[in-house]
Image (cartoon, rainbow, N blue to C red):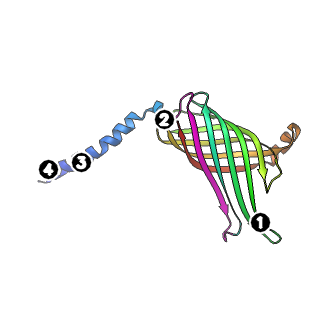
Amino acid sequence: MNTIKKFSLALCASAIMIPAYSQAQGMSSHDFGPHTGDREFSLSGTGTSNKDFDNSSFGVSADLGWYLSDRTVAGVRQSIQYADITGEDLTDDFWNGSTRGYIDYHFGTQAARPFVGASLGAIYGDGVKDTGTAGLEAGLKYYVLSSTYILARAEYQFLFDSGSSASDNFDDGAWAYVFGIGFNY
């Protein structure tokens, strides 16, 4: 009887593992990610707060891109940020936005796809001077399904009014981080 229980347990465990094994076998490297001509849409968020939640900010970023090749995507990114700031002489809410074109190059063909890229556009709103912005970026897309991924990205952004001020302001840039989800279609 003990042997029958062990055999039944092993059979049940094998039956449970078969769908997971076949899905893993079916998801070869060419099954993950986009192909030339595909599009992508991603939605990301970011936020900060102090310990008392007096000063808080959050942001949302949406990307719409087109794959020029299996590894290169070009697109448009729209970001909106809100900040609620309280200080000694300051109590105000600020809304800022930025619209940027971007191009990213992805490495690898597996589920994890690191990428590097650049962006160029404009920043505008209550808390900033309306001006140009440019940046370099790096990140990782991890495909949880064949066309669905989670995204982490860091952007080094700097502001400029003219071509000469762009090189002058590069050292005075700031980092922006986002985490989100995206889809290829």
Residue segment shown in magenta: 33-53
Task: Tell me which amino acid carries mark 4.
Answer: Ile
In the image, 159 versus 113, the foreground residue is 159
Q: CA distance from mark 3 to mark 4?
A: 12 Å
Q: Earlier in the sequence, mark 4 or mark 2?
A: 4
Residue tagged 1: 92
Task: Tell me which amino acid carries mark 1.
Answer: Asp
Q: CA distance from mark 4 to mark 2?
A: 41 Å
Residue tagged 4: 4
Task: Tell me which amino acid carries mark 3.
Answer: Cys
Q: Give the crowd class for mark 2: few <14, some 14-19, many >=20 residues within 10 Å.
A: many
Where in the figure is residue 148, as x and y percent of width and height?
Answer: 50, 42
Q: Name the disc covering residue 32, or none.
A: 2
Residue tagged 3: 12
Comparing labels 3 and 4, the label whose residue is closer to the camera: 3
Quarter of the view holding residue 100? top right
Q: Earlier in the sequence, mark 2 or mark 1?
A: 2
